[in-house]
Amino acid sequence: AQDCLVSNITVKQDFDKYKFQGTWYAVAKKDPVGLFLLDNVVATYKIEEDGTMTASAVGRVIILNNWEMCANMFGTFEDTEDPAKFKLKYYGAAAYLQSGYDDHWVIDTDYENYAVHYACREQDYDGTCLDGYSFIFSRHPEGLRPDDQKNVTERKQDVCLLGKYRRVEHTGFCNTA
Ligand code: DAO
């Protein structure tokens, strides 16, 4: 949306949560105020038997006084009237990890290579986003395919966050099993 109004941001048409299932590697992120997940962020989406979408995610975080750890996070998605717009209730495996209730919009995805996520936590008086975050996800741990970069750049512009992203590194910090 050129005017940057949250209400004018368009999301993936006919979003298919079943096709969205599986593992996504965060390759870039625009942080919210009080950022939490730093890097090595990997999210796994799943549809439960009752049709509810859930996700588990890992990521490197720094809690309290510079204590670095790998956070295990869990989320449950509430459907809304738009299939690409969810409410995400999330919490950590440990009580000292962040929990919350955020929007979770899928701006764009081809299901097989890339996805652009967006969440606005707080709108300004004029309807623009005051505090939000966004993940660029790839199905490939090495990053986005060159073919998907143009699309992703356009979508970053659509959510008015072009130039606000940082790269999310994957160093193996949260690799398990
Ligand atoms: O990193 O600053 C931040 C905000 C992220 C909070 C959301 C983490 C919970 C993840 C659940 C799975 C969906 C990606």
Image (cartoon, rainbow, N blue to C red):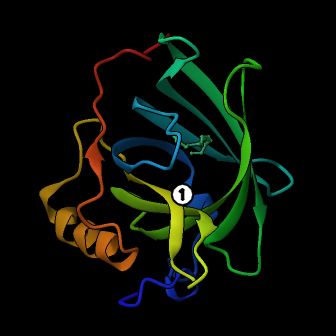
Give the left or right position of residue 93, taking residue 134 as reference: right
Identity, as a three-letter code, of the amino acid under mark 1:
Phe
Q: Is residue 125 above or below residue 44?
A: below
For this view, does 54 lie left or right of residue 149?
A: right
Relative to 172, residue 22 above or below? below
Element type where label 1 sits in the image: helix
Extreme residue in the front direction:
125
Please tell me how crowded label 1 is: few (under 14), some (14-19), or many (20+) other residues with Cα within 10 Å. Answer: many
Q: Nearer the viewer, residue 31 or 155?
A: 31
- Ligand 1: quadrant of the figure: top right
Percent across and percent down for residue 135 are 42, 52
**Residue of label 1:** 20
Question: Residue at the spot x=68%, y=80% of the render?
Answer: 82
Q: Is residue 60 above or below residue 99?
A: above
Say which of 116 and 8 sits in front: 8
At 52% from the left edge and 89% from the top edge, which residue is drawn? 8
* The one of 4 and 42 positioned closer to us in this rendering: 4
Q: Which residue in the rendered view is the most extreme toward the right?
A: 50
Q: Is residue 112 left or right of residue 65?
A: left
Q: Is residue 23 above or below residue 153?
A: above
Q: Position of residue 147 (x, y in %)?
A: 16, 64
